[in-house]
Amino acid sequence: MISGTIKKQTPPAGFREGDERLIKLTPNAASKVNGLLTKQGRPEGVLRVAVVGGGCSGLQYKMDLQDAPANRDFLVRSAGVKVVVDPKSALYVTGSELDYVDALTDGGFKVTNPNAATTCSCGESFSA
């Protein structure tokens, strides 16, 4: 073994680089995500944003912290955060902005999505 040699982990092959035209984070959202990644012990991790069926309007957002992008994902670097979106979800979130509001009521992550035709009153689901 050669001392001083560090094996660099390479991300999985098969993901594609995107840009902030797909999804953009505000400074508040980036700060919150970076804090959560650090707290979980994965400062090099990614935020996965997905759209799944459900909610009162038919579609809802799902967010998760993960170690790396998966095959076929789009990887976007926004405000110092790596965000990954699968190809199906990308159809629904293109042009969206993710913000974080620190408030006792109605706080949390908020998505401004230009593709949402309608949203429900709780603001957590939409239809396109």
Image: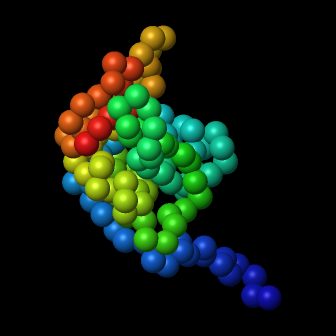
Q: Percent position (x, y) of residue 39?
A: 64, 39
Q: Residue placed at 67% from the left, 48% from the top?
A: 41
At which x and y percent is residue 49?
A: 43, 48
The answer to whether residue 116 is left or right of residue 66 is: left
Residue beneath the point at 24% across and 31% down: 118
Color scheme of the displayed model: rainbow
Relative vertical location of residue 124 with respect to residue 96 in this rendering, above or below: above
Query: In the depicted view, which residue is nearer to us: 94 or 38?
Result: 94
Question: Residue sitting at 27 percent across and 59 percent down?
Answer: 19
Where residue 34 sits in the image (x, y, percent)?
50, 42
Q: Is residue 31 visible?
A: no
Q: How many marks?
A: 0
Relative to 47, say whether 57 is above or below: above
- Write the residue at 48% across / 42% down: 62
Query: In the rendered image of this protein, does residue 108 appear above or below residue 26?
Result: above
Quadrant of the rendered image containing residue 57: top left
Locate residue 118 relative to residue 36 in the image: left or right: left
At which x and y percent is residue 88? 37, 59
Q: Quadrant of the C terminus?
A: top left
Q: Quadrant of the N terminus?
A: bottom right
Describe residue 27's horizontal placement relative to residue 113 as left or right.
Answer: right
Residues 24 and 117: in front is 117
Q: Going by the picture, which residue comes out furthest to the top?
A: 104
